[in-house]
Image (spheres, rainbow, N blue to C red):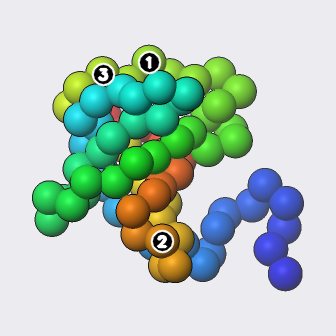
Amino acid sequence: MRSPGGPHDDCLRTRGTILKKLENGLHEAALPNGKRVICHFSKELAAAPPELTEDTVVMLELSPFDLDRGRISKVLP
């Protein structure tokens, strides 16, 4: 059983590059293979959302069941 607020062990983690900001707190990001996904902030980041600009590199978590949507878990340097 997963602990509340703990790491999501059943997701796929990858880097993504922010392409543009969409409405309602969503962003479009490109994966390393060029695939585009729609993503949102994780619960932790949504409390104090960072300002993401074009070309910002982020860590994404993708569900193995829906590879078109992701969660931004952190901003990478």
Residue that numbered label 1 is attached to: 51
Residue 77 visible to an observer of this rendering:
yes
The image position of residue 45, as x and y in percent, is 61, 34
Residue that numbered label 3 is attached to: 53
Which comes before the other along the chain, label 1 or label 2? 1
Which disc number belongs to residue 67? none
For residue 28, side relative to residue 31 (left or right): right
For residue 31, side relative to residue 37 (left or right): left
Q: Which residue is painted at 21% across and 60% down in the image?
A: 35
- Identify which amino acid the numbered label 1 is placed on: Glu
Per the model, the C-alpha gap separating discs 3 and 1 is 6 Å
User: Looking at the image, which residue sits at the far front?
Assistant: 23
Q: Which residue is painted at 61% across and 44% down in the image?
A: 42
- Identify which amino acid the numbered label 3 is placed on: Thr
Per the model, the C-alpha gap separating discs 1 and 2 is 26 Å
The image position of residue 13, as x and y in percent, is 43, 66
User: Looking at the image, which residue sits at the far top?
Assistant: 51
Residue that numbered label 2 is attached to: 66
The image position of residue 1, as x and y in percent, is 84, 81
Badge 3 density bin: few <14, some 14–19, many ≥20, Cα 10 Å:
few
Per the model, the C-alpha gap separating discs 2 and 3 is 25 Å
Secondary structure under the numbered disc 1 in the rendered image: loop
- Identify which amino acid the numbered label 2 is placed on: Asp
Locate residue 7: give its quadrant. Answer: bottom right
Secondary structure under the numbered disc 3 in the rendered image: loop
